[in-house]
Amino acid sequence: MAYHVYISNAGSQFFSHFLMDEESGALAAQPDIQLPGSPGAVATNPEGTKLWVALRSAGILASYAVDRGSGQLSTIGQVSQEEGPPYLATDNTVSYLLSSYYGGGTVAVHRINDDGTLSDGPIQTLDTDGHAHSIQTDRSNRFAFVPHTNPANAIFQFRFDESTGMLEPNDPPKIQPATEEGPRHFAFHPHKDLLYSINENGCTVSAHHFDPDNGTLESFQVIPTQPEGTDMEGKSTAEIKITPDGKHLYGSNRGHDTLAHFTIGDDGTLDIVDYYPTEAVPRFFELDPSARFAYSAGQNTGKLAAYAIDAGSGALTRIATYDVGESPLWITFIKQA
């Protein structure tokens, strides 16, 4: 069994395309998939038959049909955007595409049509604050959250109506860390009412209790992603992932150029385990769908580091390194048919 793996190369106008062997984690290079702009954030439907990508240099949100056999993409639609969003996510019904806008300080919602194309323009755009960095709905599809790095230094909280696609500010509309952490991306615990944000400016992870009835967050722990005594000049964090069993959390350290590994306790608290060297400036990393392997993209090296994940301890062992395009970031898996 294999997966198509697509790497968005922000400095190149193509996806790097690989076939991943599910047993070994090895990647076999396929021909690059040329695109009409530099790719960034990607979202897919659960079946892996549709893919949406922000072509940031071209100011386009593009819709593609995926041939799951060959992995080739066919354009089915494009809509224009003045600013390229750093993050895309579908709602849980895959009826809407949510996007955040770093420079504009906004979030937007596009309707996804039955054929996978997008509404010509957003059906809603809301002002938040500068440096809006990511957006996702919770498992109930009733709430959405939008972290903002400094100086906004906040996670905005929304109610989401899956019947209309409309976002509405929750009460309160945002939470802010006590110090200038700068929330960037986040991950929900797969089984518990917990949300973890990785904080770009503070080089920390914040653990939050999530109220599933009211859709609000309350922080209960902030923990560094880098060793005590690290010189913080030029350091920041980027991405966060949790294993499906809810036992291990990983975060990427830019400048320190490591993947930090934490265990998640029964009460949701984090304990640091180790720091694994990776490619320079790991802006994005991803776990494969089985969570047996991890792949980390080096923004400054144009390389992809592959790791085996120990099923018990969660430790990472580097197994290979692959060449990709310039400034790689988003990593997408689609099961081969």
Image (spheres, rainbow, N blue to C red):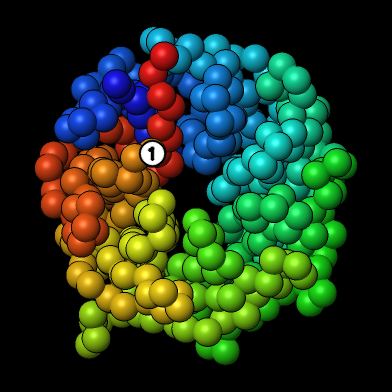
Q: Quadrant of residue 170?
A: bottom right
Asked if 226 appears above or below 186 in the picture, the reply is below
Q: In the rendered image, which residue does mark 1 sit on? A: 289
Viewer-nearest residue: 18 or 16: 18
In percent of width and height, residue 17 lies at: 34, 24
Q: Is residue 216 left or right of residue 192?
A: right
- The location of residue 316, given as percent across then percent down, is 19, 55
Quadrant location of the C terminus in the rendered image: top left
Please tell me whether residue 79 is drawn above or below residue 295 in the rendered image.
above
Q: Nearer the viewer, residue 26 or 227?
A: 26
The percent coordinates of residue 158 (x first, y second) are 76, 62
Instruction: Name the residue at 56% across, 48% down.
Output: 86
The quadrant of the rendering that contains the N terminus is: top left
Residue type (three-letter) at the residue carrying disc 1? Pro
Q: Is residue 201 visible?
A: no
In the image, is 84 to the left or to the right of 274?
right
Which residue occupies the foreground of this view, 293 or 17? 293
Q: Check disc 1: other Cα within 10 Å, few if <14, some if 14-19, many if 20+.
A: some
The spot of residue 13 in percent (x, y) is 43, 27
Residue drawn at point x = 17 percent, y = 32 percent: 24
